[in-house]
Amino acid sequence: MNIRSNWSTDEILEILESPLMELLYRAQTVHREYHEDNTVQLASLLSIKTGACTEDCKYCPQASRHAKATGLKREPLMDVDDVVMKARRAKEAGASRFCMGAAWREVKDGEDFDKVIRMVKGVRAMGMEACVTLGMLNQDQADRLADAGLTAYNHNLDTSPEFYGDIISTRTYQDRLDTLGRVRNAGITVCSGGIIGMGESLWDRARLLEVLSTLDPHPESVPINALVPVEGTPLGNRKLIDPIELVRMVATARIVMPKTRVRLSAGRAMLNREAQILALMAGANSIFYGEKLLTTDNNDTEEDKQLIEDAGMKVAEAGCSEAGCSSCS
Ligand code: SAM
Ligand code: DTB
Ligand code: SF4
């Protein structure tokens, strides 16, 4: 099967809505063809700068305008040595990718960015993949991150272009796409996905997958998050989504972006073992691993390792996880 970058909304919507057994069968067939290694990558997350963000993303506990209602404590940028120590612990626990998140609207040149560059170098020196998510970037900043050896840059599109304005007003969809373009230009791999369960329609979900799958090349990594409704945020009262909706989203992402690492991301803590195994069967081949995501709780690490073993899959080793990696494909 060839890799397509011309999917239409209708085609994707048809897949997303197809009978569950057909959807799972098709997704698993694609998955086996492109991911013979049968691995799940363990990626650990660390919030290197927490809260006090000027953006107004309705889902996010880190926006300063939600701080009073959420009670989230802001933390300045961490020290480089502390971050590298956390990465070392994550590696010892089995993670091969270390993702660092900062609650910034955009990167500003100066001392803080210089520290992030040193963090990236420190993580790479341990043989782990390094990913950062720092908000918007200019080309020079993307190039500096590439020079530091950054593996991937995470910058989510979150939802469809049409629903985006209902969730965020302080930046545009085009701003997001522009940053992704700079990341690609710099030669860093692209990590971009979205969130379901924010009140969007199935059509919006199909549109998000359309935007991602018509990028050429596809993002190497697509995180699929379920909204974690955090009390005090504007979406804090939203009902948890049905886990099967998450499974459908993962399966559809797998079918339209066969080579991509699809990451079962936020919201996994609300899934039981069976639902997580269904998501792995549907083509998810990475999870966030560690007791915390950025500010919210994540699944237990021992249970995660057991789950992967019980599912008959293997933990991906460092340096052997990117789509297109010569050792994997
Ligand atoms: N500030 C940077 C940015 O927005 O790109 C990086 C950090 S931001 C917290 C990273 C991603 O976390 C967001 O794009 C969003 O997709 C996800 N996220 C944040 N809060 C979430 C929540 N409550 N539930 C699910 N995903 C969430
Ligand atoms: C992504 O798509 N999900 C992660 C990571 N990329 C940076 C973040 C999830 C955050 C969930 C809410 C929190 O813990 O603050
Ligand atoms: Fe800021 Fe990122 Fe949270 Fe939006 S998602 S408020 S940009 S930290």
Image: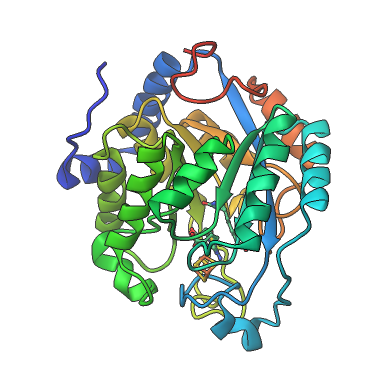
Is residue 306 found left or right of 241 in the rendered image?
right
Is residue 206 found left or right of 141 in the rendered image?
left
Compared with 270, 56 (above or below) is below
How many labels were placed on the picture?
A: 0
Q: Out of 288 and 236, give the one closest to the viewer.
A: 288
Q: Out of 137 and 23, give the one closest to the viewer.
A: 137
Compared with 102, 258 (above or below) is above
- Taking the spot 81% from the left edge, 37% from the top edge, the residue there is 88
- Taking the spot 83% from the left edge, 32% from the top edge, the residue there is 92
- Residue at the outermost bottom position: 68
- Taking the spot 46% from the left edge, 43% from the top edge, the residue there is 143
Q: Which quarter of the picture shows residue 186?
A: top left
The N terminus appears in which quarter of the rendering? top left
Q: Is residue 296 visible?
A: no
Q: Which quarter of the picture shows residue 202?
A: bottom left
Q: How is the image coloured?
A: rainbow
Q: Is residue 130 visible?
A: yes
- Taking the spot 25% from the left edge, 45% from the top edge, the residue there is 210
Q: Position of residue 125 (x, y in %)?
A: 72, 31
Q: Position of residue 75 (x, y in %)?
A: 73, 71
Q: Position of residue 8 (x, y in %)?
A: 16, 42
Q: Position of residue 129 (x, y in %)?
A: 62, 33
Compared with 267, 165 (above or below) is below
